[in-house]
Image (tube, helix red, strand yellow):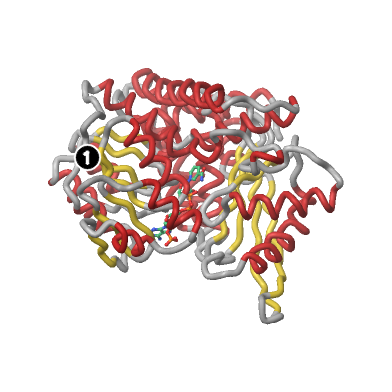
Amino acid sequence: MADMKAYVEDVLELIKKKDWNQPEFMNTAKEVLYSIIPVLEGHPEYKENKLLERFIEPERVVIFRVPWADDKGQLQVNRGFRVQMSSAIGPYKGGLRFHPSVNLSIMKFLAMEQVLKNALSGLPIGGGKGGSDFDPKGKSDGEVMRFCQSFMTELYRHIGADIDVPAGDIGVGGREIGYLYGQYKRITKLYEGVLTGKGLTFGGSLARTEATGYGLLYFVKEMLEDAGIDIKGKKVLVSGAGNVATYAIEKAQQMGAKVITCSDSNGYVYDPDGIDVALLKDIKEVRRARISEYVKVRTKAEYHEDKDGSKGVWTVPADVALPCATQNELNLDSAKELVKNGVKAVGEGANMPSTLDAIEYLQQNNVLFGPAKASNVGGVSVSALEMSQNSERLHWTFEEVDERLKGIMHGSYTQAKEAAERYGVKGNLLAGANLAGFEKVATAMQAQGWV
Ligand code: NDP
């Protein structure tokens, strides 16, 4: 036991030394590596083969300049990234994020999470992540298009349908994927499934848009049912108002729950009658406006300005909380608020939205906790189904994709739950997800030799 703990600590020390300026990556590595000690104990050969040293080191990182012209004809320069973390179980797969906060540390933390998440999907996909510090907010369509074209003019060299298949993430939706795909095709002459989240008329999959949010709800429903709780009639808090949040709200309401909040980085909406999803879609997807617009139509709802992102959401009393905006949006204080208000379950839609101390506090207070890498696997899974359809040159129906999504979410939940039981941490789905995901990746790495 002590031996493998010491091994983990040596590897963390290595990160501290080499990547001292990557706090997000360090936090993820800490969380993941400590939780997989039980797997290492059963496999002393992993230490001999320096498996962890390889696991924390991306196979490849590409950082590049992205020059583009704004509407005034001025040159702008951004930084682009692609982290190809692990191809142990399939081609690299993971989203592109366009947000001013993007840096190497965030890219690497997301890529490591993606490796384990993709393993839990049960599909043959490795892990990667990419993006840019470009801020699409307030940019015209022309500016976004020129940026995407310039970004792809470098990225195309590193990706391919059987090499690395990016998708959307924060700031990258259908519009951006369309522009990126157009430029890839133009440069390479290839009409191939190199990006997922494409439009339905050019290789996109039905249910991809809904997949992360719907999948989260399939996961949370099963987690609640296992504890004898019916989601029907429950009050639900959702943060965010983007892709994940919108379809989490939609599915929760289809399941008979009442979602009473949503948010953006300027504030949150509280609607005691339940969020009007059609209105939300109109504001966010059609008008591309701020959610403060919501209360102009739904006058009984309240808008609260919140400089601290979505923190205010967690002060509203409810039964279930679904953070769907961004990382570290639910901290220890928020967790205390949730527990005080009697919340029964937290399901992560965003990537790493809860801080480590918040997760510990929730678990100590018997709040059911669905960790992102298991509960938001729906998006990447339907992306992998889009890759299958592209390879087959076929389109599956919405129902077909949705059925497979349900099966994948059930598989993700059961793997995390069973691994937690097998390794003596029953009920801890976060540890279970790390253990099950790592087992799979490590087995493949071990079989493939020193690469
Ligand atoms: P979107 O860009 O569609 O939406 C993000 C939402 O979160 C927006 O409402 C945004 O508000 C809000 N937000 C962003 N940053 C902050 C902040 N600092 N404080 C408060 N609110 C914030 O992204 P997605 O919905 O696609 O992604 C949301 C999360 O889910 C991310 O963590 C992403 O990595 C994760 N995820 C997404 C998947 C997908 O399929 N899309 C798959 C798996 C995980 P604003 O407009 O003000 O910026």
441 or 309: nearer the eye? Answer: 309
Q: Quadrant of the C terminus?
A: top right
Query: How far across and down, in percent of the image, does residue 77 sit?
Result: 67, 73
96 or 301: nearer the eye? Answer: 301
Residue 441 sits in quarter: top right
**Label 1: few (<14), some (14–19) or many (≥20) C-alpha neighbours in 10 Å:** many
135 or 199: nearer the eye? Answer: 199
- Report if the beta carbon of the residue with label 1 is closer than 8 angstroms to ligand 1: no
What type is the residue that disc 1 sits on?
A: Lys
Residue 240 visible somewhere in the drawing: yes
Q: Residue at x 78, y 50 (%)?
A: 184
- Left or right, residue 220 beside residue 374: left
Query: How far across and down, in percent of the image, does residue 366 sit?
Result: 20, 33
Task: Determine the secondary structure under disc 1.
Answer: strand
Disc 1 target residue: 235
Query: How far across and down, in percent of the image, does residue 307 sit?
Result: 31, 68
Q: Quadrant of the N terminus?
A: top left
Residue 214 sits in quarter: top left
Query: How far across and down, in percent of the image, does residue 249 sit?
Result: 36, 42
